[in-house]
Image: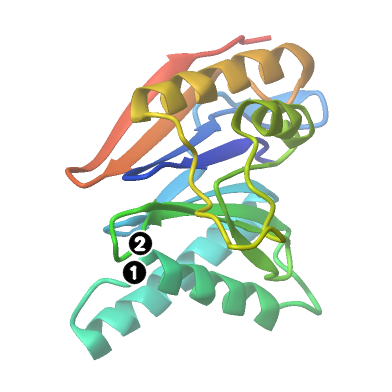
Amino acid sequence: MCRTCVAIAGADYCVIAADTRMSTGYSILTRDYSKIIQLADKSVMASSGFQADVRALQKVLAARHLIYQHQHNKQMSCPAMAQLLSNTLYYKRFFPYYAFNVLGGLDSEGKGCVFTYDAVGSYERVGYSAQGSGSTLITPFLDNQLKSPSPLLLPAKDAVTPLSESEAIDLVKTCFASATERDIYTGDKLEILVLNASGIRREYMELRKD
């Protein structure tokens, strides 16, 4: 099982992060397993849940994206990929993928976007999201720090966070450092992907190994 992932959308960037521990029960299977996959130029997905289902889902999305590229001669946008992921999960709703995903990237205007999912394809565009075993520890902290506007407020506000890119990265590092103290399934190393106008870059941070 793969456990904890987080994404934060900003005005012109998106930060998506996950730890690299894969474990079952009290056994750590590997300390260096990436939960993050790049689906398109401006779309990245992080997944928690049952690893065989996550890999199967990633392969289906890669195949569907390849078909899209042959038909339209362009990469899929992040909102289009979000809809494709929803459709793919909903198609399997009677025997679902045991995968809880967060999709991050940049939309057609260059704004950061984060989409959060349940196992059967219900999704929402949000300013930030956490999935997996550490989400119960991280989500209240993000709520306190970022205070995302309610979708019920009118006029509707942008679902992006007010932080700068470096502040968002520091916040993600703090989230995982604190979650690792309390959640035995989260730890070892933190992998962070940052998407902005200049492309994608990776950062790593060591976490507790116990």
Residue 59 visible to the viewer: yes
Residue 44 visible to the viewer: no
Nearer the observer, 183 or 107: 107
Q: On residue 140, which mark appears?
A: none
For the C terminus, the image quarter is: top right
Q: Amino acid at mark 1?
A: Ser
Q: On residue 77, which mark appears?
A: 1
Q: Residue at x 49, y 27 (%)?
A: 32
CA separation in Å, label 2 and label 1? 7 Å
Marks 2 & 1, CB-CB < 8 Å contact: yes
Sequence-first tag of 2 and 1: 1
Measured as percent of width and height from the top left, residue 30 is found at 58, 28
138 horizontally vs 95: left or right: left
Q: Residue at x 31, y 57 (%)?
A: 42
Measured as percent of width and height from the top left, residue 87 is found at 59, 79
Q: Residue at x 75, y 30 (%)?
A: 140
Question: SS class of the residue under badge 1?
Answer: loop
Q: Residue at x 56, y 23 (%)?
A: 31
Q: On residue 107, which mark appears?
A: 2
For the N terminus, the image quarter is: top right
Measured as percent of width and height from the top left, residue 36 is found at 46, 44
Nearer the observer, 56 or 15: 15
Compared to residue 72, the image places residue 40 above or below, namely: above
Question: SS class of the residue under badge 2?
Answer: loop
Quadrant of the image occupied by residue 143: top right
86 horizontally vs 63: left or right: right
